[in-house]
């Protein structure tokens, strides 16, 4: 099979597509013939060599796929060879065959194309879990999303109207990405510069923000706290810059503002409570299956095109969600 391999920390110069042996499933696992795989910023963080992501090089990236079950491991029930599925493997999804935990492998319902389905297990499921579980979104909430122009940002814009609607404000790293965020469903989007706080305040008529979804480490946390409405929730779910993070706000500030600061990690939840992630994946697939949700994706024709797309994501130049056609 063909597999994308990252040979050392760095950029595209250390990524290549190689022939590799297909893995076999162990107990509780399945192997999957991959049709499409989703690209995620975590692959970029892994490639950069951010602490805590890659324990040994060479590394095979790829954490969400659609495809068909190739082989079922010991003790797996409810999944059979040939079944169309999506899965959130621990890695190695940017390849012809991947091994995934059965607990994180979900049948693909009729009516969902494998192309869009590949954007579900990590991307769309994360967006849904951020809003519903971690963020306790309620219809009518004002929501501020940092990095609104990317894959997660676009998925959030699709989901908020389905969850009852709210006022959606996005931030982007480059002014030219604001239009893409607005086109994806944000009511307003602003570049993260010194005018951001005032721009958001004006956009929400000085009312404060009910929910902030923030993957920027603690870079924007002070602003999040300033913008949060009484009772506001701030969900921290990444550290895109990869640098050191500051301490969380003191208890007195949280109590005085009736504020909640929550962490979210798909990876940690998948390891500790896979059923919660699988439920999120199923719920997201159901939204696609019955036509309530459409998920725009950009298709890359083959694995050889992935390193350049990872470059664009690493430089903050990418917009929306990317999936790559692997087979089928
Ligand atoms: N906790 C979880 O389980 C979880 C799961 C999925 C994704 N995430 C996080 O959610 C965010 C979005 O993920 P995605 O896969 O949809 O990626 P993406 O948004 O398509 O790409 C990542 C974006 O991060 C922004 N960014 C901010 N600071 C950056 C920096 N120093 N270097 C490079 N990019 C920077 C860039 O957009 P702007 O500059 O326009 O903001 C970039 O386009 C990522 O930070 C990711 O790590 C977390």
Image (spheres, rainbow, N blue to C red):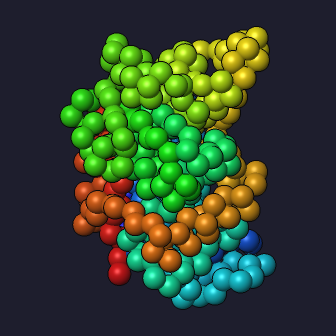
The residue positioned 40% from the left and 66% from the top of the image is 294
Instruction: Return the residue nearer the eye: 110 or 257.
Output: 257
In-front residue for pair 238/167? 167
Can you give x and y, in whole percent of width and height, for residue 71 in the image?
Answer: 60, 82
305 and 236: which one is in front?
Answer: 236
Work out which quarter of the rendered image holds the C terminus and state it: bottom left
Q: Is residue 39 left or right of residue 89?
A: left
State the image quarter where residue 56 is shown: top right
Image quadrant where one finds the N terminus: bottom left
Instruction: Tell me if 229 is positioned left or right of 242 in this view.
Output: right
Image position of 96 (left or right of 139):
left
Observer able to see residue 39:
yes
What percent of the width, then of the height, locates residue 94? Answer: 42, 61
In the image, residue 183 sits, relative to residue 104, either above or below, namely above
Q: How many discs mark residues in the rendered view?
A: 0
Q: Residue at x 63, y 61 (%)?
A: 280
Classify residue 203 by image quadrant. Answer: top left
Q: Position of residue 72 (x, y in %)?
A: 65, 81
Q: Position of residue 240 (x, y in %)?
A: 46, 32
User: Which residue is at a point 38% across and 16% down the rendered structure image?
Assistant: 198
The reply to whether residue 1 is in sight is no
């Amino acid at each position: 099979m063909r597999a994308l391999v990252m040979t050392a920390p760095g950029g595209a110069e250390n990524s290549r597509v190689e022939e590799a042996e297909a893995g076999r499933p162990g107990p509780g696992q399945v192997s999957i013939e991959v049709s499409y795989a989703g690209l995620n910023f975590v692959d970029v963080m892994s490639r950069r060599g951010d602490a805590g992501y890659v324990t040994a090089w060479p590394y095979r990236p790829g954490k969400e796929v659609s495809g068909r079950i190739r082989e079922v491991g010991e003790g797996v029930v409810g999944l059979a060879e040939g079944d169309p599925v999506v899965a959130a493997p621990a890695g190695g999804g940017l390849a012809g065959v991947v091994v995934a935990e059965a607990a994180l492998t979900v049948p693909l319902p009729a009516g969902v194309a494998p192309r869009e389905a590949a954007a579900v297990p990590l991307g769309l499921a994360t967006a849904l879990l951020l809003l519903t579980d971690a963020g306790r979104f309620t219809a009518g909430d004002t929501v501020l999303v940092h990095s609104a122009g990317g894959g997660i940002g676009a998925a959030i814009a699709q989901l908020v109207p389905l969850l009852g609607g709210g006022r959606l404000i996005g931030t982007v790293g480059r002014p030219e990405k604001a239009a893409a965020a607005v086109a994806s469903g944000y009511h307003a989007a602003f570049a993260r510069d010194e005018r951001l706080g005032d721009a958001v305040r004006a956009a929400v008529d000085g009312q404060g923000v009910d929910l902030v979804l923030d993957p920027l480490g603690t870079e924007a946390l002070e602003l999040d706290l300033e913008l949060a409405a009484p009772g506001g929730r701030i969900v921290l779910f990444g550290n895109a810059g990869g640098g050191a993070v500051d301490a969380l706000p003191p208890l007195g500030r949280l109590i005085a503002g009736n504020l909640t600061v929550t962490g979210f990690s798909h990876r940690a939840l998948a390891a500790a409570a896979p059923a919660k992630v699988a439920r999120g994946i199923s719920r997201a697939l159901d939204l696609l299956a019955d036509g309530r949700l459409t998920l725009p994706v950009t298709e890359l024709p083959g694995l050889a095109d992935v390193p350049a797309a990872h470059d664009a994501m690493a430089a903050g130049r990418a917009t929306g969600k990317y999936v790559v056609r692997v087979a089928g």
